[in-house]
Image (tube, grey):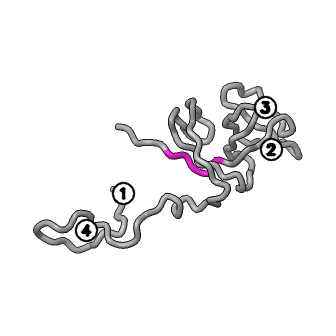
Amino acid sequence: MNSIHPNVSSHSTTGFSAAGGDFRGKRLSLDSLLETNPASTFFLRAEEKTTLGGVIHPGDILVVDKSADTKNGCLVVAVVDGEMVLRQVVHHGRQIRLHSEKSPGEQEKYCQARIWGKVVYVLHPVQP
């Protein structure tokens, strides 16, 4: 069984303790956990479901770092015909292409699309 214990004391006590007493120590910060460049990091909301890079659902939050280096297979937000879209970077020799899930045969060349930023995290709610 996997368990998560953020700064939880290993000893047990009887009675009632102060609210939040089990969570002593440093408070978790989303900014510090993501470890991105704050000046170039943006949060965007996904509008459509996609399986590029895993499953992204409508309403998920994409954490996009405009300063992050892109590599083969990474997800990026690109600007295609003035619209921000999610694409996967695919290297073909010296050419960089942006792969779309909707049209597997459709691949924009990098010169026809502009990479806006790299998706570094996807945040989504856990639903039963």
Disc number for residue 91: 2
Residue receiving disc 1: 2
Q: Distance between the residues labelled 2 and 1?
A: 37 Å
User: What is the C-alpha distance between the residues marked 4 and 1?
Assistant: 22 Å
Q: What element carries label 4?
A: helix
Q: Which of marks 4 and 1 is in front?
A: 4
Mark 4: which amino acid? Answer: Gly
Give percent across and percent down for residue 64.
63, 48
Overall secondary structure of the magenta stretch?
strand
| Mark number displayed over residue 23 | none
Q: Which residue lies furthest to the right in this view?
A: 94
**Residue identified by numbered label 4:** 21
- For the residues labelled 3 and 2, the Cα–Cα distance comes to 11 Å
Residue drawn where x is 47% and y is 42% of the image: 124
**Mark 3 or 2, nearer chain start:** 2
- Image height of 118 relative to 58, above or below: below
Stretch of the chain drawn in magenta? 119-123
Of marks 4 and 2, which one's residue comes earlier in the chain?
4
Of the two numbered discs 3 and 2 in the rendering, the one whose residue sits closer to the viewer: 3
